[in-house]
Amino acid sequence: MSTSSPTISATSSATSGDATSKGRIKIVHIYPREMSIYGDLGNTRCLASRLRWHGYEPVIHQHHPGNDFPTDAHLVLGGGGQDSGQARVEDDLAHNADVLRSLAADGTPMLMICGMYQLFGNAFITVEGERLPGIGILDVTTQGNAKRMVGPVVLETAFGDVVGYENHSGSTKLGPAQQPFGRVRAGMGNNGTDGTEGAVTGNVFGSYLHGPVLPANPSLADALIRLAVERALGEPFVPGRIDDELADRARTRQVRRLIG
Ligand code: GLN
């Protein structure tokens, strides 16, 4: 039931089978029209650029409602959106839930930001009381509130300090065994009270951090790339040389500004 051909090569030659490429990595951006605010599209662009700089060939597939989710995804990205955008993708998400769950169980790396993080959980209940069921890959439940949590964030994570920007009405609680993505050093995080931010299960990462988060946090971007490459190609990730000085300076400056 595909309505268009949403797969585009992100290489400059726009052809596949580049003899100099270390391998082809398919990034699926889920709901780029409905769920991509506060720069979240930049995460897809960042991963495509870094893959290229590392010598791999990125292929970007945009998944829109009404289509079957590609089972050959190597890396899946989702962003934030209004509550109304979340409602618009609900049916499609339910339709594709089994494919997404089996990709997640098989170790496919995924990064879900804000609204899609909430929908990868058990449910998001809007401030008006509407219940939007999630697909339960992450054991988190979110309740919308009248007061939004807005502002810059610094997290302590397995990838070092991660900086970003949050803007959500949803207050998220982790299930008893659910690991958070990070610990809040500055900002509100999942709920402003328990010091947790985001959630991680296997290779699926959920977080409230926009920015977009990946360009300023290259070690997180490369962790996703490493997972995708090793699963897709069955061989170790061989990084190229990337100059991350500007990103590192921007991140360090933000940490200093917010924490001292
Ligand atoms: N609608 C959700 C909330 O406000 C998600 C917001 C977002 O994705 N930025 O909690």
Image: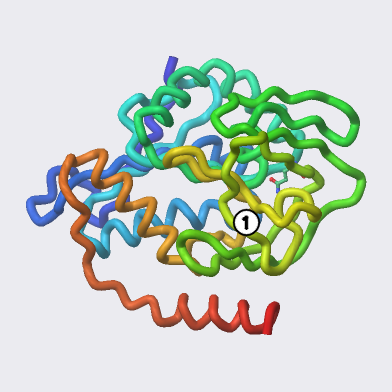
Task: Answer with left or right where residue 111 lies relative to residue 53.
Answer: right
- Total marks shown come to 1
Percent of width and height locating residue 199? 58, 44
User: Which quadrant holds the C terminus?
Assistant: bottom right
Give residue 250's quadrant in the image. Answer: bottom right
Q: Where ligand 1 lies, by image quadrant?
A: top right
**Residue closest to the eye, 222 or 211:** 222
Q: Residue at x 24, y 39 (%)?
A: 232
* In the rendered image, the vertical position of residue 191 relative to residue 91, given as above or below: below
**Does any atom of ligand 1 lie closer than 8 Å to the CB of label 1?**
no
Estimate the x, y position of residue 214 in percent, counting from the top left: 48, 60
At x 22% / y 54%, what residue is drawn? 237
How did the renderer colour the structure? rainbow
Q: Amino acid at mark 1?
A: Leu
The location of residue 68, given as percent across then percent down, is 44, 20
Quadrant position of residue 192:
bottom right
Secondary structure beneath disc 1? loop
Q: Is residue 86 above or below residue 179?
A: above
Q: Residue at x 29, y 72 (%)?
A: 242
Q: Residue at x 67, y 62 (%)?
A: 184
Image quadrant holding the N terminus, namely top left
Left or right: 146 in relation to 78: right
Along the viewing direction, whichever of 6 and 121 lies nearer the viewer: 121
Farthest residue, direction front: 176
Crowding at mark 1 (Cα within 10 Å: few <14, some 14-19, many 20+): many
Can you see residue 203? yes
Residue named by callout 1: 209
Q: Position of residue 99 (x, y in %)?
A: 43, 21
Question: Going by the image, does 83 lie left or right of 252?
Answer: right
